[in-house]
Image (cartoon, helix red, strand yellow):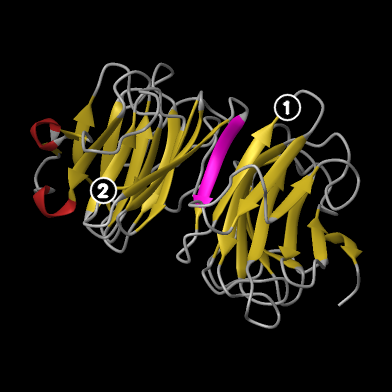
Amino acid sequence: MDCTTLYTWIENSSYEWTDETYIQWGECYGDTLSPLRQVWLDSEYAYAVTSSGLNIFDIESNNKVAYVYVEDGYTTIWGSDTAIYLGTESEGIKYIIKSTILTDVDSPIDLTAFVNTYDFYYNASSVNIKYLHGYLDTLAVTTPVGIDIINNGPNGYKSSASNNHITKCFLTDNREVYYIEQKEDYDKVLVVYSCLFDWSTHDASYITDGTTLASGVRINDIFITTNTSISGNNNSIFIATSSGAYVIDEESTLFDIYLTTLAGQSTDIRGIWADNTTNRIRGKMYTTSFGIGAALSVMDMSTGSLYDRYTIVDKGKVNKTLVTEDVIDVVAGGN
């Protein structure tokens, strides 16, 4: 799940989000010079990359157990079952094999010696890594020159598209590619069901031109849940924009726009994530917002309500509904 640099966890009796540009989580090093850039989690650890490096926290104890200090930090993070991949601004992709992650109950362990350079037959088209995603042994990488899909397995391949307007990407477990294109006059979510064919012909596109997405909004983040359309044969698309969160059923093209009826809450959504089985009518969606009224919010998709909300002044509790009023402002296409 992406986090903007303006969000942070504070060690307290319970966690809360604040509008600060520093990070603190247990013994996490971090100050105004090392803002949080992205967080990734697996079943054991939370991995936080900052402009100073990597911090690893044990989820059960909330303690920082390992770290890597790098002068320029890391730009992005994604992890498979076997490795943690880290993006850099000028040195390409780095990675740490998960089995080499050492932890100690007494003090965090420096893992610098276990950081490897991703240097195989197929590599990213630029050493400036903007964003990473992937599935198993396949990486999706955005750089200033475009997007690369890289697989260095026994039947490896590389597929690339040149486009200096791409920001983020998402690779599903069916190896479908979704990515964001940002231009001065509009943004797009572009979909390629197979990256081994022609990138110039997109299988689907969602454009901020007033059709599905409102004119003039900016697209900040995407998340995909696979085979979760109402029929179960297509995907659900979650899009974070500068004016609410869009939830699209890819097969029916029905969509909801999540704004808010809460006074003073920001609708500038910067990060979005959902449980793997979530769609328009079930599961939970998680969003982070920016500016006045910023919060981490949890939406209950079955009721269209705000299930939980974390800000500097009020916090919801897990499994306890904080606000039950409807927060869907627009339903397009009906149910």
The part of the chain drawn in magenta is: 166-170
Whether residue 199 is situated above or below residue 292 in the rendered picture: below
Residue 162 horizontal/vertical position (percent): 55, 30
Give the residue type at disc 1. Answer: Lys
Residue closer to the observer: 195 or 186: 195
Mark 1 — residue? Answer: 183
Whether residue 151 is situated above or below residue 303 in the rendered picture: above
Whether residue 201 is situated above or below residue 53 in the rendered picture: below
Give neighbour class at mark 1: few <14, some 14-19, many 20+ (Cα, 10 Å): few
Q: Quadrant of the C terminus?
A: bottom right
Whether residue 233 is situated above or below residue 219 in the rendered picture: below
Residue at 69% across / 31% down in the picture? 182
Give the residue type at disc 2. Answer: Asn
Residue at 83% across / 48% down in the picture? 213
Q: What's the magenta bit mostly, secondary-structure-wise?
A: strand
Give neighbour class at mark 2: few <14, some 14-19, many 20+ (Cα, 10 Å): some
Q: Is residue 143 visible?
A: yes
**Quarter-of-image position of residue 44:** bottom left
Residue closer to the observer: 86 or 269: 86
Residue 276 horizontal/vertical position (percent): 51, 69
Residue closer to the observer: 332 or 21: 332
Q: Is residue 310 visible?
A: no
Find numbered disc 1 in the image and state the secondary structure of the residue it sits on. Answer: loop
Find numbered disc 2 in the image and state the secondary structure of the residue it sits on. Answer: loop
Residue 127 horizontal/vertical position (percent): 35, 23
Image side of residue 2 versus residue 74, left or right: right
Mark 2 — residue? Answer: 152
Can residue 195 be found in the magenta stretch? no
Q: CA distance from mark 2 to mark 1?
A: 32 Å
Image side of residue 87 versus residue 145, left or right: left
